[in-house]
Amino acid sequence: MMMKRTYIKDIKDKIGEEIKIAGWVDVRRDHGKLIFIDLRDMSGKIQTVALPNHKEARDAASKLRSEWVVEIVGKVNKRPEKMVNKDEVNGNVELEIMKVKILNEAVTPVFGINDDGREVNEETRLANRYLDLRRGRMQKNLRMRHEVMKFIRNYLSDNNFTEIETPLLTKSTPEGARDFVVPSRLYNGKFYALPQSPQQYKQLLMAGGMEKYFQIAKCLRDEDTRGDRQPEFTQLDLEMSFADQKDVMGLTEEMFIKAVKELYPQKKIQQIPFPIITYKEAMEKYDSDKPDLREDKNNPDLLAFCWVIDFPFFEKTEKGGWTFTHNPFSAPKPEYVEMLMRKEKIGEILTTQYDIALNGFEAGGGSVRNHKTEALQKVFEIMGFEKEKIWRDFGHMLRAFSSGAPPHGGIALGLDRVMMILQNEPNIREVIAFPKTGDARDPMMDSPSEISEEQIAELGIQIKKSANKSKI
């Protein structure tokens, strides 16, 4: 019978047993007669030792180098009392090597794996991300991201939400940011768009009677480069039928409180319930619509949540027209509905938008939605859209609302940003497995990249190159 692999975290419970482990050589120390190999796997690290009386195993251990992948069979022994390291999980045991099997050799890493990597050039780290991910800090970040996502799924499922995937190939509509577009081979001259968010689909799900939806969704926006922004990012997206502002805010707040208590017990939420301030108050007092309310900004484990409400629905464009401040699908506050329908005092209309801020960052935002065709039409009319354009771009939404759509509202939370704060990281790239650089490149995959002439011809497009960028 083949010996089953033991994870390193479980070794402390197997003193006196012969076991098999597998992983990466973290550190090799040759002390002459004794060779020490620190081995790590996904669960932790263990010190192994090759003794002179196991000559074959010792000879094999002498060849090992950092990052080689090996399988070791050995006996779990208690460390001598003076060698116990109480700060390590396996600090009271070591593995006496009986047999070594080399599974794969490795070239010398371009940077060290044993430190936190903060001093390494980020371009180099991203170009070798498969190495960078081996360091303990990055492993912890991604595993805690998994734990948070698992908590969210369980919490929302327990509250009768259904997780539903929405399409990645959709229609380009004027929603705010610039779309990534995908040319169609079957329909030359036509294009899909990648979703900036699942906003329209989740509202269509409400029209479809699903009532409670959520999704951990990829969102894609072709925005100008910024240091802490990604062309693709992840958000928790949820929507509730027959819900008002208090319902969505209350559910979201409870989810954050329970997640912090369960997964980050070392952290303190400064104020519960979360304070609620108006947009006007936030701008006048803090000069920001995402104020940092921490009483002690030097405490990395202090979390200051707050809600910001009563946003203006519209703002002036550079050309003197009107555009939405957050989302064209938001509903005005009830007392402003008539002003919207009459298109009067547009700058004074307040929306049901609510944002949640955390330590000076926008953690998410949502609103109660317009669920009536006439009201949504008025929003686009105020923005200067002709009737034909409204129906061409948003006819599917208008028809869905006229079919008996319920009142509904929701929120989208930026998971990358939330994880950055919870993990005390300086930017969102540290909590994303394979992020892009600040200027939207992937140096590991060398993307974006050119495509072949055959692909271009199949798609029925032509590339015109300018001095600064390629244009389709």
Image (spheres, rainbow, N blue to C red):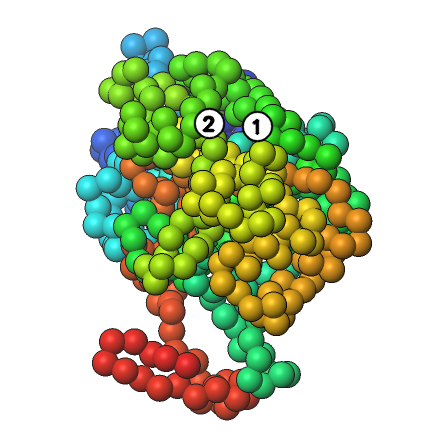
Q: Where is residue 433 in the image (x, y as percent from the top left)?
A: 43, 48
What residue sits right under mark 2 in the picture?
A: 307
Q: Residues within 10 Å of mark 1 (few under 14, many from 20)?
A: many
Q: How crowded is mark 2: few (under 14 residues within 10 Å), some or many (20 or more)?
A: many
Q: Is residue 15 above or below residue 103?
A: above
Instruction: Report the amino acid beneath label 2.
Output: Trp
Q: In this view, does 105 lie above or below 254?
A: below
Q: In this view, does 31 lie above or below 390?
A: above
For residue 157, which numbered disc appears in the image? none
What residue sits right under mark 1 in the picture?
A: 249
Instruction: Report the amino acid beneath label 1.
Output: Met
Q: Which residue lies furthest to the top in this view?
A: 81
Q: Where is residue 392 in the image (x, y as percent from the top left)?
A: 62, 70
Q: Can residue 184 be seen in this view?
A: yes
| Residue drawn at x 39%, y 64% as measured from the top left | 445
Q: Is residue 141 visible?
A: no
**In this orientation, which residue lies closer to the viewer: 66 or 119?**
119
